[in-house]
Image (cartoon, rainbow, N blue to C red):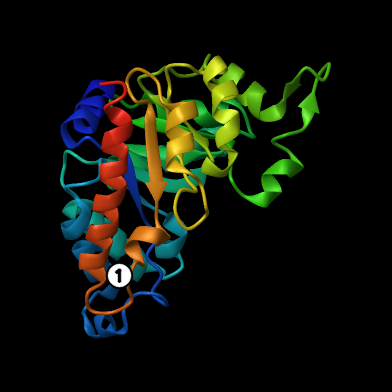
Amino acid sequence: MTRQELIGQIKSKRSFLCVGLDTDIKKIPRHLLNSKDPVFEFNRQIIDATARYTVAYKPNLAFYESLGSRGLESLQKTMEYIPKEIFTIADAKRGDIGNTSSLYARAFFEQMNFDSITVAPYMGEDSVKPFLGYAGKWVILLALTSNMGSRDFQDLRIGDGSSKLYEQVLEKSQQWGSTANMMYVVGATKAEKLQEIRQIVPDHFLLVPGVGAQGGSLEEVAKYGMNKDCGLLVNSSRAIIYASDAKDFAQKAGEEAAKVQQEMAGQLDKII
């Protein structure tokens, strides 16, 4: 998907919502366990209920890989079911030496046909570049994550002490990709830092997890992180997909997604 196509979806749906398909077999409604493929059946109903409100879906690979080959089959069926105009993110956090990254890129972009993949930058340029060789595909580079342990390394001051490690990631990686094929992960619980991040990457899209169950504020994220094209994909997983654990789970997920979309529409009205 191109940048303009993504922006077009945001404007059309008046939304920058990304729904995380973190589908845990231990958390889905019990009645679905009688289905032939419970994980896919859960995803199918969630997608049906939320597709009108979201511009992106983000399956977290761990939830599928933990089930072995059955989980990967569920993931492939999910990918085939997601409407083609909706952006897809493989939340896989890959990153390895060049030839291995090339195979990861082939797996996610050619075999599973994701539009993008999250990539860890720790191993540097040659571990990221193979993902950038596909037209219409995106790297979403981990920059500043929302977990507690992010402080261990991402906030460390480096060199002469004038910049932090995550800031150097943002600076350096702009030499590898462009605003048309690279985004950055910035956690919503770090919303106050979005203004500083926008000084470094004013035009790139940011994938912002942590809104909803993790306590991030959508209003603050929009205030500090939005640019003229919106420039945001804000992810909500648990707060939407697990809004109910009963037979009405899909309906409740749709209702929660609609609430978020309405709030996003209000934020977009300020720039569009």
> Nearest the camera: 46 or 90?
46
Quadrant position of residue 106: top left
> What's the residue at 35%, 17% (across, down)?
228
Measuring from the top left, give residue 53's x and y in whole percent.
21, 46
Quadrant assignment for the N terminus: top left
Residue 41 vs residue 66, the one in the foreground = 41
Q: Which kind of residue does numbered mark 1 sit on?
A: Val
x and y percent of residue 138 in the render?
37, 30
Q: Residue at x 52, y 52 (%)?
A: 215
Can residue 113 be seen at all in this image of the molecule?
no
Q: Which residue is mark 1?
A: 39
Tell whether 67 sits left or right of 246. Answer: right
- Residue 222 in the figure: left or right of residue 189: left
Residue shown at 37% from the left, 26% from the top: 231
Residue 196 sits in quarter: top right
Q: Is residue 55 above or below residue 60?
A: above
Residue 249 position within the rendered picture, expressed as x and y whole percent measured from the top left: 26, 71
Residue placed most toward the observer, 93 or 85? 85
- Secondary-structure class at tag 1: helix
- Residue 159 occupies quadrant: top right
Front one among 34 and 239: 239
> Alpha-carbon neighbours of circle 1 within 10 Å: few (<14), some, or many (≥20)?
many
Q: Is residue 53 above or below residue 164?
A: below
Q: Tally the marks.
A: 1
Q: From the viewer's perspective, is 126 left or right of 153?
A: left
Q: Position of residue 230 (x, y in %)?
A: 34, 25
**Picture quarter with the C terminus:** top left
Q: Is residue 171 visible?
A: yes
Please, is residue 140 above or below residue 93 in the view? above
